[in-house]
Image (spheres, helix red, strand yellow):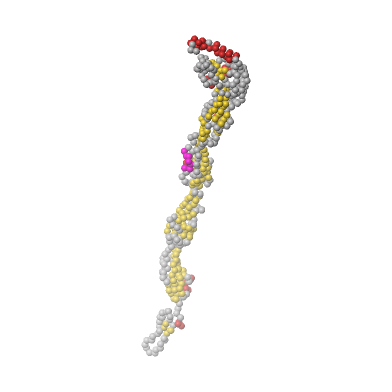
Amino acid sequence: MDNPAFKNFLTNNVSIIVCLLLMLMSHYGFSQGPYTADNDRPFTWPTNVLPSSQCLQGNCDFNCTTVQPSTDFIQRTYRYEPTSASTGSSSTGSTNSTVKADDKRYAAPIQGISACIVIGTTTSNFSTNFSTVNWKNFESTALSHSFCAGGSVNLASTLTYNVGVTWAGGANSSGVFTTSTPGTYFPTATRVFDNGTSVITFTVTVNGPTALNFSAMGTYCSDAIDPDIWNFTNVDAGSTFSSSTAIITGGHFIDLGLTPKGVTHTIIQNFTNANGCSSSTTSTVAVDQQITVSPGANQEACDNSGSVTLTAATTGVSWSCVGCSYVSGSSFDTDAAPSGNHTVRATKTNGVCSAFADKIFTVKALPIVDPGPTLTYCIDDGAQAITGGSPAGGSWSASCGSCVSGSTILPNIAGVGSHTITYTVTNAAGCTDSADRSLVINGLPDEASITTNAPTRCDAGDVSFTASLAGSTINWYA
């Protein structure tokens, strides 16, 4: 075969040699006949040879223009990918004929020819059919896929040949893979051909969403600092927050002033991680309205007035004594409190809100009263002016009733015995106090109880008289 003359002969007479080969193949019985999709079928050599421009190199597994020498025909299989699973039919002699779903063609490159000879069950116009039919090997255009849990991927759509394929590894019969469990999976597509079995293994990564922990935000007073939602979730940056009722400002602050009061609001958190997987959760927040308290006007009472009720302009308040302990319930104890000013506080709550206001409760001092010493009179002494008693300007009264008139004592009205007279004073603050003194009225002695010596004398000289009365002093008069 190294004879140059023989090589020149082959090169110069290639067309004649090809024709002789085709005639010989046809003569020895390679004729067209019935066939099935997966069995080798009889074939005849076509009488035409495709030029390189019609070889559809993108669908072949060899280069039509740079074929290598061969001592025998190199058999290649090409498969048509139909638009449906229908087998279709083969129509001889028609330019628009279709082929079965797994039709086969055999291509034999021949050294020195700038073209591909395609042999098989063809018609005389095979070149036209071949240039318009898409022939491909069994392969996938994308072997790696990813999606978020709960999603899916159509693996069948990536195949160049998708008839008679068996799916495994989690893909369904249509070649769709779906799962809600994150992880890495390896579904397969298998096709059995007459010249062997082809298996395509895919890598599918299923990504999970980020777990969100959004704790309850609690209840706030409307005048508090707006809470930051980020402080209540494990994923802050990248999260978005929304609510149909609460007012959110700055993306992650609850506007306590504008958010409706007295109801519970639902806050929705949405987050999409770097894999594009989204998760969502909710929390709650409530806002109570702050209130104002008016304690009312300052109050006052005189010392020793007992328990005085505290009153406020705002209803429903509770009272306390600031820095003291003279308030019990809603009463101020003037008996326990010293005279002077005391601060009392009115407080009211509304949910988590609380407000208070202070006012002054003044305990006014009583006047200091001195009624004077005990007064003693005889029952026949007549009217007696009452002396003593301070401060001046007070009034007198007595246990013996009308025995005192103004500032005069009437002993005969008082009667013999001890009596109490009271001096009452009201000071400039309007506080009144009093003090008592004793009044003693003595009765006249009983004449029958007086004993004398009654001496008699006729001439001049002194006479001595004696008399006695128990508990009395005897005075003599001439």
User: Can you tell which quarter of the image residue 154 is in?
Assistant: top right
Front residue of this view, candidates 413 and 357: 357
Image coordinates for residue 266, horizontal then vertical, percent: 53, 42
Q: Residue at x 47, y 46 (%)?
A: 223
* The magenta stretch spans residue 236: yes
User: Can you tell which quarter of the image residue 130 is in?
Assistant: top right
Front residue of this view, candidates 384 and 127: 127
Q: Residue at x 53, y 21 (%)?
A: 60
**Residue 294 in the image: above or below residue 74:** below
Image coordinates for residue 21, horizontal then vertical, percent: 56, 13
Image coordinates for residue 190, horizontal then vertical, percent: 56, 28
**Residue 137 in the image: above or below residue 384:** above
Q: Is residue 47 visible?
A: no
- Residue 163 appears left or right of 460: right
Q: Residue at x 47, y 51 (%)?
A: 356
Q: Is residue 307 visible?
A: yes
Q: Residue lying farthest bottom?
A: 458
Front residue of this view, candidates 366 and 73: 73
**Residue 398 in the image: above or below residue 11:** below
Tell me which segment is drawn in magenta: 231-237
**Residue 328 in the image: above or below residue 134:** below
Q: Main secondary structure of the magenta part?
A: loop
Q: Residue lying farthest left?
A: 461
Quarter of the figure with the C terminus: bottom left
